Image (cartoon, rainbow, N blue to C red):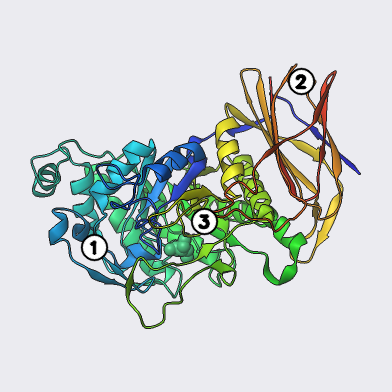
Amino acid sequence: TSASLVLDPAFTVAPVNRRTFGTFVEHMGRCVYTGIYEPTHATADEDGFRKDVLELTRELGVSLVRYPGGNFVSGYRWEDGVGPREERPRRLELAWHSIETNQFGLDEFIRWCAKAGVEPMMALNLGTRGVQEALDLQEYTNHPGGTALSDLRAEHGAASPYGVKVWCLGNELDGPWQIGHKTASEYGRLAAETARAMRMVEPDLELVACGSSGSGMPTFGSWEREVLRECYDLVDHISCHAYYGDDGGDVASFLASAVDMDRFIDSVVASADHVGAELKSRKRIDISFDEWNVWYGERSRRTDGPGDQWEVAPRRIEDEYNLTDAVVVGNLLISLLRHSDRVAVACLAQLANVIAPIMTEPDGPAWRQPTFHPFAITSRLAAGTVLRVETSSPTVVTEKFGEVPTVDAVATYDAGKLAVFLVNRSVDQAIDVTVDTSRTPVSEVLEALTMFDDDRLAVNSATQPDRVIPKPAAVRLNDGSVTITLPPISWTALSLG
Ligand code: AHR
């Protein structure tokens, strides 16, 4: 069986958007405490940040980090997390049923971002709070000085404003599990009034309205329409969240998860453009895919149920990812890149321990899950412009998505350097792929890496951190094309120059 790809530098989607390589840090489980922050750890720096995790974050190629939630943000008082640590209150944290010590807050997060070399993206509490608290947080975060809250920030050690550009107007407020859950019209009004007031201070902020928490939500579609009818002119992006899992052993459908992501993005773009058309607006609303990943739930590693205990940083959804999950994550990134014309931001949820590419043990090592690798490699190699790729591929029949192409691919082109990212979704067939490079003169294979394993369920662990890693792939460079054999259930990256 074989497949072929045709690409041409003249047929472009959009420039590669670095914000595609965002992730997410929530006050949830051990993402913050014993994840990125552990003052007693052997590698902790003067701020209490784990240097091993900082290094892995840089290696992951993260561009932006969303913070502080997630469901957590909908009950959060940001003031609790600033000022002298010994005065910060311990609070009941309802979203994940734990105790929040507030030892890590906004000032620490911004310092951590600077050390990790990432852009902060802040989420506002529009669950239990409203316009005034959003304005207070904005003043503390972004106002230069000479006002109560900007001076308070300076008192806390940060004379210069933080200049946070991208703000989420709440989180998943369509979900009945959300603290302060709202109807679309209630939320749309609140998003509009919060955005209007924030823009009176800083007109150029990038504001994200909450879309649906998943395309399976009963209100999906109508939520986007109603929310955007209220706030279209006042926001820039609408959010998408999607998590995929290998439920019921239907591996073929799981491997085709990116087909669902493609359709999800296309439908939200259509909903947004529909409202734009109704309003006769020239403005275009783009997508902030600010939570995406593989998430199993029942297969979560060493996860405590909430029970009736209220604990500090309990283990929550510490999914252990395998090779198949890494292939799906690589494919989801292909889908996001392919939509670079409309996806303005994307965040792999989350960064450390909680459904995360980076795992840690308290007082112990940090290591890379298999899903770390396709993210890091795509972030490192994708550059310049995303190209439209014409793929001719055999198909595979899936229960959930019908007949879908077995090979999926995207490419980027940057001053004579071509990067191609490919997956083979077949569970048992290797596929020979020919990439027509006649319009992108390349004469050298700079890198060729594949994620594949004879055991599709192979995982990494603290004791075997490199069991699943990318391996060199054999590529044949011909006159005007390259050929490569993709093993079944594999993800591959090629860099040609
Ligand atoms: O990332 C975990 C959770 O998933 C987030 O808190 C929430 O927004 C989503 O439901």
User: Which label lies toward us, 1 or 3?
Assistant: 1
Q: Nearer the viewer, residue 446 or 185?
A: 446
Say which element carries label 2.
loop
Q: Which residue is mark 1?
A: 77
Regarding residue 444, the answer to whether it shows in the image is yes
Q: Nearer the viewer, residue 201 or 479?
A: 479
Q: Which kind of residue does numbered mark 3 sit on?
A: Cys
Regarding residue 288, the answer to whether it shows in the image is no
Residues packed near mark 2 inside 10 Å, few (<14), some (14 to 19) or many (20 plus): few
Q: Which residue is mark 3?
A: 240
Q: Quadrant of the N terminus?
A: top right
Q: Is residue 455 left or right of residue 428?
A: left
Q: Which kind of residue does numbered mark 1 sit on?
A: Arg
Q: CA distance from mark 2 to mark 3?
A: 35 Å
The earlier-in-sequence mark between 2 and 3 is 3
Q: Residue at x 8, y 40 (%)?
A: 146
Q: Is residue 229 left or right of residue 169?
A: right
User: Which label lies toward us, 1 or 2?
Assistant: 1
Q: Is residue 268 left or right of residue 55?
A: right
Say which element carries label 3.
strand
Which quadrant of the figure has residue 163? top left
Q: Which residue is mark 2?
A: 439
Q: Is residue 351 above or below residue 299?
A: above
